[in-house]
Amino acid sequence: MQLIHSLLKLPLEQTGNIILIESNREITHKSWCFWSKNKTEYDFLISKYWTELKFGSVSSDLSKEIAPYRYNYINSEAFFDFHFQLISNSPRVKLVYEEVEKIQSVNGIKRVFTRNNEYQAQHVYNSALDFTTIDSERILLWQHFKGWFIKTDQATFKPSQATMMDFNIPQEKASHFMYVLPFSETEALIEFTAFSIPSGYSDENYDSFIKNYIDEKFNCSYTILREEKGKIPMTDFKFPATSKEGVIHIGSLAGSIKPSTGYAFNRISRHTAYLLESFLDNNKSIYKKQGLARFHFYDTLLLQIIKDQPEQVAMIMNKLFTKNSFYKILSFLDERTSILQEISLFYTLPKRLFLKEVLKYVWFKFQK
């Protein structure tokens, strides 16, 4: 959708006609959050933002201003409504609901086959990711979440403050935290998140975590307005920029999901801008990697810990948030820090634990 939005800003003679092939008419609506300190392409869709973030653990309860950043919320329903309206208003875009079966390239022209049709184009972008194709030697975890949008009977929440992570809940055999987005003093999204559980939990388990958290943290009477549920892949697999047929990868297929956090909106925006530059300049390489190699290395180390020692994650995050400014943390997670800033940040983390993971990483590379 971000790519179509960008392409439709160009004249027809540059883009030609555009076809969007979707396999499913149903869209799972979710909450999308990202942080920014400058105006963004989608500011008009941001329905709520927060200037203060909170972190919680068994031993800490911190809240800090994040200026010049702000933490933004977009409801995916509003996002898709805008883009589907954009598509329906454009005579050069055709939307079809079919399953893509294969793609071939002949003399630079891509041939996209569905069960009943064949489409040809010079440029084909693909976001459909088959997780069975990920190298079995790579780490593949899942971030599972379920949230309740609730309305309380009395003023309960601080509207300017979002809770990014609260680990002060039972951890059991995985890494768990709560996520709180208040939209007003009486309305909020309360979400439970679990790292590393391949199959996730039952709805009863999710609901139990959420209910207990609301009862203990807020002790309020409330009504559940709606729910959201989903999962996000967390992998150190190095996604290729294109297929062997020359199809350009976008979205999760291009590695746009940050491996260690699941955040993707900013990364997709940056990748889309780069792809548009490549489209306008045929000499510009489209082999754009998502992020710098050192950040991929950092993500891999944390994924190894989440996989092998999930009980350590709460402690690591506690040290990260209590010993560093929230501004530095957000800059680091957005891959906007310098090496010197990263060294000072790592100095605050458990050195022996990460050194062990570095040695494991090097040994794995050596074995290959």
Image: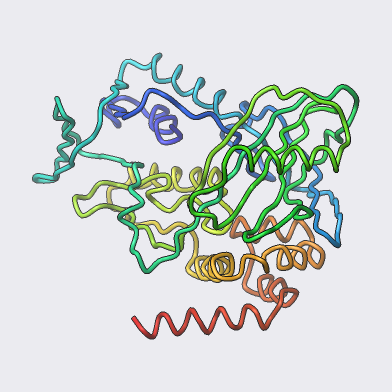
User: Considering depth in this image, is 151 or 163 the residue closer to the camera?
Assistant: 151
User: Image height check: is 43 above or below 34?
Assistant: above
- The N terminus lies in quadrant: top left
| Residue 250 picture quarter | top left
Q: Position of residue 264 (x, y in %)?
A: 53, 46
Counting from the top left corner in percent of width and height, residue 10 is at: 38, 29
Given residues 69 and 140, the one toward you in this image is 140
In the picture shown, does residue 81 fall above or below 1? above
Which corner quadrant holds the C terminus?
A: bottom left
At 76% from the left and 31% from the top, the residue drawn is 188
Q: Examine the image and state in which quarter residue 92 appears.
A: top left
What's the image's color scheme? Answer: rainbow
Whether residue 142 sits left or right of residue 154 in the image: it is left
Residue at 41 percent of width and 36 percent of height:
3
Q: Is residue 277 left or right of residue 232?
A: left
- Marks counted in the figure total 0
Q: x and y percent of residue 305 in the render?
A: 58, 70
* Residue depicted at x 55% and y 58%: 196
For image coordinates 83% across by 37% down, the residue present is 160
Residue 204 figure quarter: top right
The correct choice, above or below, for 260 with respect to 26 in the image is below
Check the image and report above or below for 217 versus 228: below
Rendered location of residue 281, percent (x, y): 32, 46
